[in-house]
Amino acid sequence: SQWHTLVLAVSGQSFSLTVDCSVPKDVVVETPFPASLSVKRASFYLGNRRRRKGVFTGLLRQLVLLPGADATPRICTAMNFKVATLSVPTVLQDVPAKPASNEVLKYPYETDTKVTLGSRPPCTKQEKAQFWFNASRRGLYLCNGSAWISVLEVKQRLDYVEEYQNLVTNSETMGIEIFTIPKVGLFAATANRYTPPGSAIYKWTDGKFVPYQNIPTYQAQSWKYFTIGKKIFLAVANFEQNDRGQEFSVIYKWSRRKEKFITYQRITTHSARDWEAFVIEGEAFLAVVNHREGNNHNIDSVIYKWNPRTGLFETNQTIPTSGAYDWEFFTIGPYSFLAVANTFNGTSTKIYSHIYIWLSGSFQLFQSILTFVPADWEVFRIGDRVFLAAENSHSYDSGMPAPSNFYAINSSIYELNITAQMFVKFQDLLTYSALDWEFFSVGDDSFLVVANSFDGFTFSVNSIIYRWQGYEGFVAAHHLPTVGCRDWEAFHAAEGSYLLYSCAKEPLSKVLKLKTT
């Protein structure tokens, strides 16, 4: 009436049997176990639960064959080792499913099992409870009657990064937005410097980005993709005036009939750098960063609210900013936050950036952090920990002596301290005029990639991928040659996982492929 855990390790002439994580029993035999063993047309006899005599009686809960490794260190770390498991999915630990009509109740160990190999088969009611083994991804999937559910899947690990595609752009690219339109595909919108020809939208086709649509823009800085109900929008932040001397940033709406983005609403902005879209309590907002008006960097940035009656964005709140570059919206529990990256107040780049919290229908100051031209905030989570990364671009103060290098400067990662109810510095990383952070994951591993753009001498600077190492924080793992790197975007496609970086010095951006093992 008890479960027991048995681990049998075989290597050459040595056999080791461990029962319930006790002292292993070791046996050395004369005839070694073969290094390679053909199992073609072979069958494995494990035992029969209906026999009362022999080497095995009872129920077999799990069998794991682990080539090239001893499972004992993995199993015997569990608190209750008698019921320890190696990657047993939740779906297989549940009680038996309720049978349809008058079918006989079957427990998991009595289920008729069929495993399909090859490319993804259909998953309908006819295939329900059948398994499919995906050899390319080394994963086992279960059909629930409508979709394949991952049962066992090897976690990928980042091995190296390789150059995948040279993306020729209309002109230098200040920012990139990756987005997916349901039932249409994966897209990348590039914010290009010059008009003409404006900025371009590319569609992922046959494993590459190909030109899809061109949109007139005026020294575009960034794009923001967002949805409101079934409506799909794409907003561009224009830094300069148009041909008529008007300074607008534009919201475009996706036309399902034309399968193109068309002009929807123009909003007056002042050297706009960034848009941020978010929802609070079911209401949609859109915030723009105004960088400067003429030579005045101390101006208001604006938060707009969607009016469902008029179908337009209307001014909701203004917030004073100083040479602002970026908005970053995030939530922690029931609370909503909006962080602004301030860069220059007219005399110094050593100024405070601010985090605001939504209270009583408006954003109110929550915390101020001293920064040096942060072009981007990046919020990310690892487990239940919340981090906020700011890259510092360069240090300049008209009243202070010039440093030996304006551009070699620490960028900082902050962590939310629940007790103190504030973000506290977690780690400093040396960067070179950094302009962007991008957080991404591969399997169980977490990474941060920084866009280093200039070291004081050249724009050909290595950007770095940092791997999360727990207690050690983020540790440099990969050095990537980049030129004038401005923005990083991570994305996934059917062909794999990728990074795309924009170049602010050449009309050429690059797609890099993450090679995993």
Image: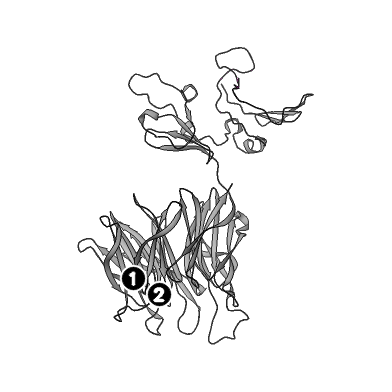
Q: Amino acid at mark 2?
A: Tyr
State the residue lying farthest toward the left: 309
Residue 141 vs 388, above or below: the answer is: above
Identify the residue under disc 1: 216
> Which badge, 2 or 1, is on the more N-terminal residue?
2
Residue 47's spot in the image, x, y percent?
59, 18
Question: Which kind of residue does numbered mark 1 sit on?
Answer: Pro
Disc 2: CA contacts within 10 A as few (<14), some (14-19) or many (>=20): some
> In the orientation shown, which residue stands out farthest toward the right?
30
Query: At numbered mark 2, what does the secondary structure look like: helix, strand or loop?
Result: loop
Query: Which residue occupies the foreground of this view, 361 or 167?
Result: 167
**Is residue 44 shown left or right of residue 141?**
right
Query: Which residues are the magenta region?
Result: 42-63
The residues tagged by marks 2 and 1 sit, at their Cα atoms, a distance apart of 9 Å
Q: Is 233 a magenta residue?
A: no
Q: Quadrant of the N terminus?
A: top right
When the figure is inspected, residue 221 is found, relative to residue 91, above or below; the finding is: below
Q: In the displayed structure, would residue 132 be above or below residue 255?
A: above
Characterize the magenta stretch by its predominant secondary structure: loop
- The answer to which image quadrant residue 105 occupies is top left
User: Is residue 167 at all visible to an observer of this figure?
Assistant: yes
- Rendered image: mark on residue 194: 2
